[in-house]
Image (cartoon, grey):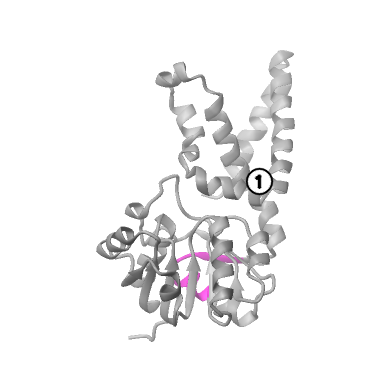
Amino acid sequence: MAEPLFRKITIVGVGLLGGSIGKAARKHGLGREICGFSRHPKKIVLAKRLGLIDTGTDCFAEAVENSDLIVLCSPVEDIKMRLRQLKQLGITRTLVTDVGSTKREIIRAARGLNFVGSHPLAGSEQSGMKYANHRLLEQSLCIVTEDGAQKKSIATVRRFWNAMGSRVVVMKARVHDQALGFTSHLPHAVAFALMAAVPPHLEHLAAGGLKDSTRIAMSSPELWKDIFLSNRGNILKGLSVFERSLKRLKDAIAARNTASLLKILKTSRQKRGRLPS
């Protein structure tokens, strides 16, 4: 049997993504011990029962003690707070990564630590460990950031995500935040805003189009509040571009401009068809 990549892996935040990582790490034998941290003891009990972790605690210092890899799986502001705690505990050599949807603010908070930023593009609008799935990361894209990180640490983090079936792309944090501002954060902002625009008395008449377009508006408000604010500049740029796009559509409809309207619809359909499956 192959030697595990790590002796102890600590998952901080055993929710959908953290639970899926723990379950996948156990399945693939990536650590001798998969330890989970939650502020709620009952969640630790449930995570063990679901087979997501081997051990767990509601004491952060105890959870990260003697770890070889710490994976921070919580909202952006909590990740930044945990990074500060690691510095206070003097845990500066242990390899640390995260799953945060924005990277520049997190990387700034991680200065002085052996940190490699990660963002697995996996998950769903569902939340909570009961939806955790060891196959969630398979064939998904995982972005790893290189800013301020040691080459050896980047290579180890790549091996970790690859071992769970993810395809890894390495890039700068600035590029990540700009790109995800359009491909992830803007769609969520639009979905939330679209749902807010629907009159309550018409909700019972919702058809497939509304449900398909707003599925991600079921995502965690607490999580997305942090994402919107931490990538504020890029999201505002994306929203401005979207506003111009929406105005072109609105103007074409208002003017009964069939040619312009058809061009907008055809171009959008073609672009949607080019998206990776």
Please say whether residue 28 is visible from this viewpoint. Answer: no
Is 264 situated left or right of 277 in this image?
A: right
Label 1, secondary structure: give it. helix
Tell me the residue that label 1 is attached to: 182
| Residue 199 seen by the camera | yes
Looking at the rendered structure, the kind of residue marked 1 is: Phe
Q: In which image quadrant can residue 177 be found?
A: bottom right
**In x, y percent, where is residue 193?**
58, 31
Q: Residue at x 57, y 68 (%)?
A: 83
Question: Residue visible at 32% across and 62% down?
Answer: 41
Membership of 168 in magenta stretch? yes
Q: Tell me which corner region of the image, top left, top right, bottom left or bottom right, holds residue 170.
A: bottom right
Q: Which residues are magenta?
A: 157-169
Q: Position of residue 72 (x, y in %)?
A: 50, 65
Q: Name the residue nearer the viewer: 229 or 122.
A: 229
Above or below 228: residue 152: below
Relative to the observer, which residue lies in front, 265 or 214?
214
